[in-house]
Image (tube, rainbow, N blue to C red):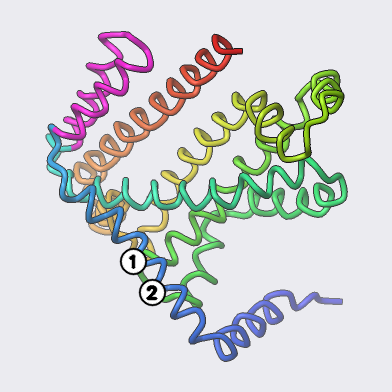
Amino acid sequence: MELALGEWVNAFINWLVRAYGDTFEQISNALLHFILAFEGFFRGLSWPWLAGFAALLGWFVTRRFFFAVGMAFSVWLIAALGLWDKGMQTLALVLASVVISVVLGLPLGILMGRSDGFRSFMLPLLDAMQTMPSFVYLIPALLLFGLGKVPALIATVIYAAPPMIRLTDLGLRLVSREVVEAAEAFGTTSWQRLFKVELPLALPNLMAGVNQTTMMALAMVVIASMIGARGLGEEVLLGIQRLDVGRGAEAGVAIVAMAIVMDRLTQAVGRRVMRRYREEA
């Protein structure tokens, strides 16, 4: 017996396009405005402003001179390679994806942490989202929203949101039962317990979730250049198509520089937030 999964999926997507084409167009327009708001801001920045901000933020959260210099150097490197505008397009799409992933992932993670039944329902979905080849997400996004940044955003959110959901769930489940029972003994409501006890204690996992979501969003945005997302991924794609090793190498170095800045800064901010919380506790 042959399972015609491909035909069923195609029929379902075609039905979605016929029945809800106008709705998808409205969603697409709203998301495009959201992305363009990020893009307009970052493309309007010159590299000294962003390098200065990265250095100041690096110094503020670590108090390490060479760390701050390294952040500024990485930002300068993107501009020095002549890829500043494309780098800002990539950065805007990554940050827009991370915002949506966190906004969706945090409440879903909280629901998983509070409900074993919902967790049992979500775990297979998250497993599928994380193990499915990332190229597969591009196909339905392309059919429903066409070429460009919007399908890239949607595919990136699907790929990058699971770490935020999983680590929020894990962080809440690692909160000590004794602490929760003590909070209950003081008469706290469910919401007070969540926002004043459980989420603060889960901060290390939440910050790790933001870090992992950011890195996965960057990886997916580069792949999404295949459907017209532009940015640094487009340079890599052109390098492959024209067998231009140098062009691909320049884009690769710029992507690594951006990844280093985003990874180190999000980790350092997470450690800083935790230190501050422990000092105040």
The amino acid at mark 2 is Asn
Mark 2 touches mark 1? (CB < 8 Å):
yes
Tell me if 177 is positioned left or right of 250 in this view: right
Instruction: Say if 271 sits above or below 196 in the image.
Output: above
The residue tagged 2 is: 29
Callout 1 environment at 10 Å: few (<14), some (14 to 19), or many (20+)? few
The amino acid at mark 1 is His
Instruction: Say if 190 sits above or below 142 in the image.
Output: above
Q: Could you tell me which quadrant the C terminus lies in? A: top right
Magenta segment includes 123: no
Residue 273 in percent (x, y) is at 49, 21
Secondary structure, mark 2, is helix
> Residue reaching furthest bottom?
18
Q: Quadrant of residue 241?
A: bottom left
Q: Main secondary structure of the magenta part?
A: helix
Q: In which quarter of the image is residue 200?
A: top right
Instruction: Say if 140 sits above or below 243 in the image.
Output: below
Q: Which of 219 and 88 is in front in this view?
A: 88
Tell me if 81 is positioned left or right of 65 in this view: left
Bounds of the magenta segment: 49-78
Residue 275 in percent (x, y) is at 52, 13
Tell me if 188 is positioned left or right of 106 in this view: right
Instruction: Say if 144 sits above or below 93 in the image.
Output: below
Secondary structure, mark 1, is helix
Residue 33 is tagged as 1
